[in-house]
């Protein structure tokens, strides 16, 4: 799946501290997952995007994105654990 590849690319960029490139890749992944209605993928992508904002110190953006991820985890009836842990780090 293309969105999964962009998500992985974003993770690689984040690990290398290339935050702008990571955000771009996660946004591409998000757009694709939204377009195909992949709510499970969106939860993962949004948590990764939020973690990137958190690492940058952008707590407001991180909180917003983690909240969106939590909404998708509830809507897709999947574990909310990661989203809740991420929100707890703020």
Image (spheres, helix red, strand yellow):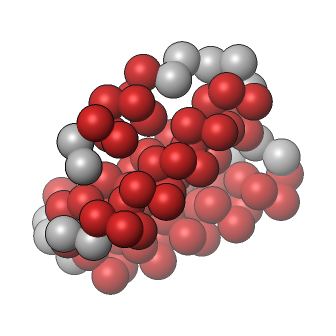
Is 49 on the left-hand or right-hand side of 58? right
Question: Toward the viewer: 64 or 14?
Answer: 64
- Tell me: residue 44, above or below residue 17: above
Question: Toward the viewer: 84 or 42?
Answer: 84
Name the residue at 46% across, 48% down.
66
Residue at the right extreme, as displayed: 36
- Residue 7 in sight here: no
Name the residue at 83% across, 60% down.
35
Question: Toward the viewer: 22 or 54?
Answer: 54
Find residue 27 and report its horizontal and vertical position in percent: 55, 70
Is 4 on the left-hand or right-hand side of 75? left
Residue at the bottom extreme, as displayed: 20
Residue at the left extreme, as displayed: 16
Is 81 on the left-hand or right-hand side of 18? right
Name the residue at 53% across, 47% down.
67
Find residue 33 and report its horizontal and vertical position in percent: 72, 53
Find residue 7 and report its horizontal and vertical position in percent: 48, 54
- Residue 82 in sight here: yes
The image quadrant that residue 49 belongs to is bottom left
The image quadrant that residue 18 belongs to is bottom left
Question: Toward the viewer: 31 or 67?
Answer: 67
Name the residue at 67% across, 27% down.
74
Find residue 87 and report its horizontal and vertical position in percent: 35, 41
């Amino acid at each position: 799946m293309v969105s999964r590849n962009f998500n992985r690319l974003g993770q690689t960029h984040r690990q290398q501290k290339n935050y702008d490139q990571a955000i771009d890749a996660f946004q591409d992944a998000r757009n694709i997952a939204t377009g195909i209605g992949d709510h499970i993928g969106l939860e993962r992508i949004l948590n990764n995007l939020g973690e990137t904002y958190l690492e940058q110190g952008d707590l407001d953006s991180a909180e917003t994105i983690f909240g969106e991820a939590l909404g998708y985890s509830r809507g897709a009836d999947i574990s909310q654990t990661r989203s809740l842990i991420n929100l707890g780090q703020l």
